[in-house]
Structure formats: structure tokens, C-alpha cells
Image (cartoon, rainbow, N blue to C red):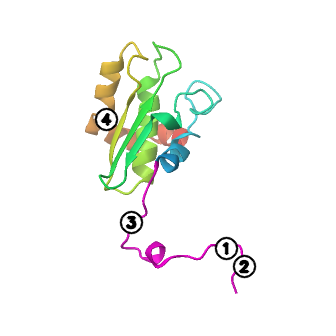
Amino acid sequence: DKPIWERPVTAGEEDEQVPDSIDVREIFDLIRSINDPEHPLTLEELNVVEQVRVQVSDPESTVAVAFTPTIPHCSMATLIGLSIKVKLLRSLPQRFKMDVHITPGTHASEHAVNKQLADKERVAAALKNTHLLEVVN
């Protein structure tokens, strides 16, 4: 017998063909604990990522995350963005399209960093980078 407090599992949850819906909180929970490359703190603790800057459309399979570097000339902005993107790529179903970008107006090289984060080859290389994978895990 199951304990009384345990929620019953629905047929939809058991059906492997029915995808689980993904919401803002789930995305934020995936990225909040990523460590900052220069500080012994998480991206959430440094306010680099905040739940209000995460957008999800499960029906359209899209996720957008805006992140705010700690300073306008942060040299680690691309690495932080790649860390977020790699974490999402490794955690979410392949159907999702991801947009990880700098919060508008918060970094001196915002356009250049966003261009790098949108570069499929750079992201593919990041997925193979063992040091980056250690930061993400």
C-alpha cells in the first residue's frame, strides 16, 4: 500500500509518449546553482540569473534566458552564457530551442557576446569542453 500523503500518479504522467510540460521555475532551478567562474558563489547569489528573466513556452518548445553580468566589462560574460546554454542543452528535451542572451544594456560588448552565444559551432565546442562541464555540474 502507498502512504496516504503520496500523490497518485496520473495516466498522463506514466505515459512516456506524453511530454512533461516545462515551466519557468523548472528552468530557473536548472541554472540557479551554476557557479560563477570568478567567484565562489552561484549565478543566483550574484543576481546574474533571476527567475523574472526566464521565459518558457512549452507548446512552442522555446526557452529564453537573459542574464546580467556582475559588471559592464565582465570578461567572463561569454563563458557564463555558454555555461547556462550547455546546462539547458544537457537537461532539456531536444525539441527545445534556446535563446541565452545578456540582459539588454548591462554589458559593454553585449552584441558581440550574444552573437557568440548564438553561434552553433561555439556552443558545440563548449559541449565538449571538460572544464566548462565541471563548472556546469
- Residue type at mark 1? Glu
Give the label on residue 122, or none.
4
Q: Depth-wise, is mark 1 or mark 4 nearer the camera?
A: 1
x, y percent for residue 121:
27, 38
- Residue type at mark 3? Pro
Q: For the magenta stretch, what is the residue range?
A: 1-23
Q: Secondary structure at mark 1?
A: loop
Q: Secondary structure at mark 4?
A: helix
Q: Depth-wise, is mark 3 or mark 4 nearer the camera?
A: 3
Give the label on residue 19, or none.
3
x, y percent for residue 88:
43, 46
Q: Main secondary structure of the magenta part?
A: loop
Instruction: Give me the C-alpha separation between circle 1 and circle 4.
Output: 45 Å
- Mark 2 or mark 3: name the one nearer the start of the chain: 2
**Is 19 placed above or below 83 here?**
below
Where does label 2 land, which residue?
Answer: 3
- Mark 3 or mark 1: name the one nearer the start of the chain: 1
Residue contact at pointers 3 and 1, CB within 8 angstroms: no
x, y percent for residue 77:
44, 24
- Mark 4 or mark 2: name the one nearer the start of the chain: 2
